[in-house]
Image (tube, grey):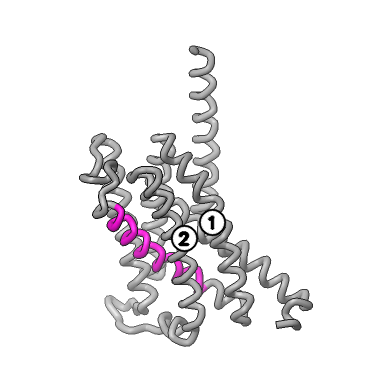
């Protein structure tokens, strides 16, 4: 451990891996912000805390199961000349879940109808939110940890990077969730991003990799445009007031 603390290579690996984990965690934060916006604020905060705590727990557990995790990339069956591993199956299933959930949320926003018990903060609604967070955490954790294994060889560096990334996700998730809840057009944009991310996960499962830089550039560009729209609406309200 002392050798790691005094090794420039270890610090470089930690900084690089932490940055990658934060970028990979953007998807998780977006989903978390959208899903908790449909329940009352006190329960939303608790659900967000539970969700990010679970994300951290899943990542650390997966890191301690490195041999099993690496085995997930080995082919388990073949269909139409394509071989699929358990990782592919999980990515496809998680991607389809994201697409279905986001599409359902978009329909609910367009129709202006809340799900039963959601705004009233019922226990069943809170439990359903936690279940969805667990499913998505598992999918995103898998991809995140496989990246960590490829980037670093030391378990302590991997765990440290994951913990730092999850803390940053926790700090940023509150403001992001509040912003999404207060601006309906931003929520619709976030849901569209989740559909895009779901399609990318399914494509990865079928061995068709969509560079994440394309997706993150689209998210950053659209978010910048939406920020200008929010500022323009705020200035118009001030001028008319």
Residue plotted at (28% across, 76% down): 80
Are discs 2 and 1 less than 8 Å apart at CB? yes
Residue 202 can be seen in this image = no
Left or right position of 178 against 203 = right
Question: How far across and down, in percent of the image, does residue 190 sit?
Answer: 42, 45
Left or right position of 18 against 87 = right
SS at mark 2? helix
SS at mark 1? helix
Q: Residue under circle 1?
A: 169
Estimate how packed mark 2 is, as few (under 14), some (14 to 19) or many (20 or more) residues with alpha carbons within 10 Å. many
Question: How far across and down, in percent of the image, does residue 13 sit?
Answer: 68, 72
Which contiguous range is marked in magenta? Answer: 126-146
Residue 128 magenta-highlighted = yes
Could you give the CA–CA distance between mark 2 and mark 1, rounded to whole angstroms? 8 Å
Residue placed furthest toward the bottom: 67
Measured along the vertical axis of the image, is residue 36 above or below residue 63? above
Q: Residue under circle 2?
A: 52
The image quadrant where one finds the N terminus is bottom right
Residue plotted at (37% across, 57% down): 199
Residue placed furthest toward the top: 240
- In the depicted view, which residue is nearer to us: 45 or 58? 45
Residue plotted at (49% across, 35% down): 226
Image quadrant assignment for residue 224: top right
Left or right position of 88 against 148 = left
Question: How far across and down, in percent of the image, does residue 55 sit?
Answer: 45, 65
Decide whether the magenta segment is chiefly helix, strand or loop: helix
Give whichever of discs 2 and 1 has the lower sequence position. Answer: 2
Estimate how packed mark 1 is, as few (under 14), some (14 to 19) or many (20 or more) residues with alpha carbons within 10 Å. many
Residue plotted at (29% across, 41% down): 119
């Amino acid at each position: 451990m002392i050798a790691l603390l005094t090794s420039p290579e270890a610090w470089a690996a930690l900084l690089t891996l932490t940055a990658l984990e934060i970028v990979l965690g953007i998807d998780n934060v977006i989903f978390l912000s959208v899903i908790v916006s449909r329940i009352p604020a006190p329960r939303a905060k608790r659900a967000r805390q539970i969700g990010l705590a679970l994300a951290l727990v899943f990542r650390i557990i997966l890191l301690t199961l490195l041999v099993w995790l690496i085995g997930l990339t080995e082919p388990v069956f073949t269909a139409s000349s394509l071989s699929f591993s358990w990782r592919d199956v999980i990515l496809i299933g998680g991607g389809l879940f994201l697409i279905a959930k986001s599409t359902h949320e978009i329909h609910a926003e367009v129709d202006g109808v809340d799900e039963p018990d959601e705004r009233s903060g019922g226990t069943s609604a809170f439990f359903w939110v936690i279940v969805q967070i667990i499913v998505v955490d598992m999918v995103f954790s898998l991809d995140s940890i496989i990246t960590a294994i490829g980037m670093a060889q030391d378990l302590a560096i991997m765990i440290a990077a994951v913990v730092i990334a999850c803390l940053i996700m926790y700090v940023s998730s509150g403001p992001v969730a509040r912003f999404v809840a207060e601006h309906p057009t931003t929520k619709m944009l976030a849901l569209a991003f989740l559909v895009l991310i779901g399609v990318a996960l399914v494509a990865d499962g079928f061995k068709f990799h969509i560079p994440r830089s394309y997706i993150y550039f689209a998210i950053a560009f659209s978010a910048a445009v939406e920020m200008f729209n929010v500022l323009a609406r705020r200035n118009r309200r001030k001028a008319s007031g």
